[in-house]
Amino acid sequence: MKKDKLFEEENNLSIDEKIKKDQQKRMVHIILVLSLFSLVLLSLAAFMISQMISQKEEFREEGIKAYNASSYVEAENDFLKSLDEKQWFSENMDLDTKLYLASAYMRNGEFENASHVYAELQKSTNSYLKSYDLITMKGLADALLACQTGQDYTSYIEDLKKESERGNHTADLYLGTCYQQTGDEENMVTYYQKYLTENTSGAGSSYINYQLSSYYLAKKDFATAKTYIDAGLASGDQAYMDLIRFNEIVYYEGMLDFDTAFSKAESLTNDMPENDTYKNEYDFLYTRTHIDETPVHTEGDAAQ
């Protein structure tokens, strides 16, 4: 009965009323569709925003700050937290963070961990890494690890010597590093210098120039030390650049040029303000270059 009544009412409607009613139905349908579409868009936007916002960059910045302060364990933890954060469009950032992480491992003597990170980076096809010699960097970590642990040390050294004799200069880097780790300074110098005849820049160069400049500074051979300091500064390899800059300060101190030493210390401290070693050096040099000329006792004190 109800259906018949409804059919009867619709038949009694005028054409204009029918058109108006159809328009209302279409409008309700459109509103429903638009509302559903808007809800889907808002949900999608919320999802995308959630995937693009994280604490990744915040943890990374904290890690860099700790790294610059030579707090390498803290830096490692922050870098790992950054890498654990999921965020879209962050591949290049993550690759750079991994480079920092590997460097932190190297600076903290965790060579096996550094080797693993470099091996992981080698698998990437991202063009961002093209300028990094990851093979040499991993090899340096492996050489340090082998000589640090002493595992198969003799065999490792002999294999490297054979490679060196074949003209493989990368083997010279690893040999010098092994000898440096085991305290054989004479052989360290021999193989490091041999390596530098063919590789004045790139991976490992800042490490070598730092070690050689430290060696000659300890011997008070300031002229030779300065050649390696200058080579390190010009190498472009940033891994140990702050230590080379510190050696430059030590060089100018040794030459009794405290004004230049202070200027260099001020620059290094400004770049790495959280590093206590560099700050202490700056404070020391400040006292040598900013002498307080105010007399301790005045004429009035003497009269009394």
Image (cartoon, helix red, strand yellow):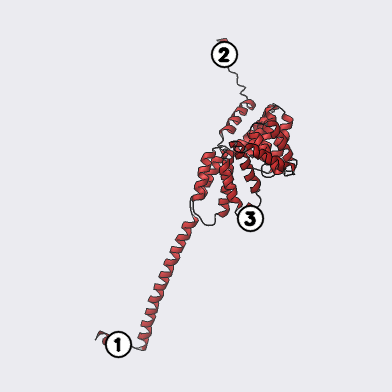
Query: Which sits earlier in the primary sequence, circle 2 or circle 3?
Result: 3
* Residue 233, horizontal then vertical, whole percent: 69, 39
Q: Is label 2 or label 1 in front? A: 1
Report the quarter where the N terminus lies.
bottom left
Tell me the CA gap for discs 2 and 1.
Answer: 120 Å
User: Is residue 270 among the parts visible in the rendering?
Assistant: yes
Mark 3 Cα-neighbour bin, 10 Å: few <14, some 14–19, many ≥20: few
> Residue under circle 1?
7
Above or below, comparing residue 296 to residue 223 in the picture: above
Give the residue displayed 72% in from the left and 29% down from the top. Answer: 222
Q: Secondary structure at mark 3?
A: helix
Q: Secondary structure at mark 2?
A: helix
The residue lying toward the viewer, choosing from 22 and 131, is 131
**Kind of residue at badge 3:** Ser
**Kind of residue at badge 1:** Phe
Query: Which sits earlier in the primary sequence, circle 3 or circle 1?
Result: 1
**Kind of residue at badge 2:** Gly
> Residue under circle 3?
127
Report the quarter where the C terminus lies.
top right
* Residue 112, horizontal then vertical, whole percent: 57, 42
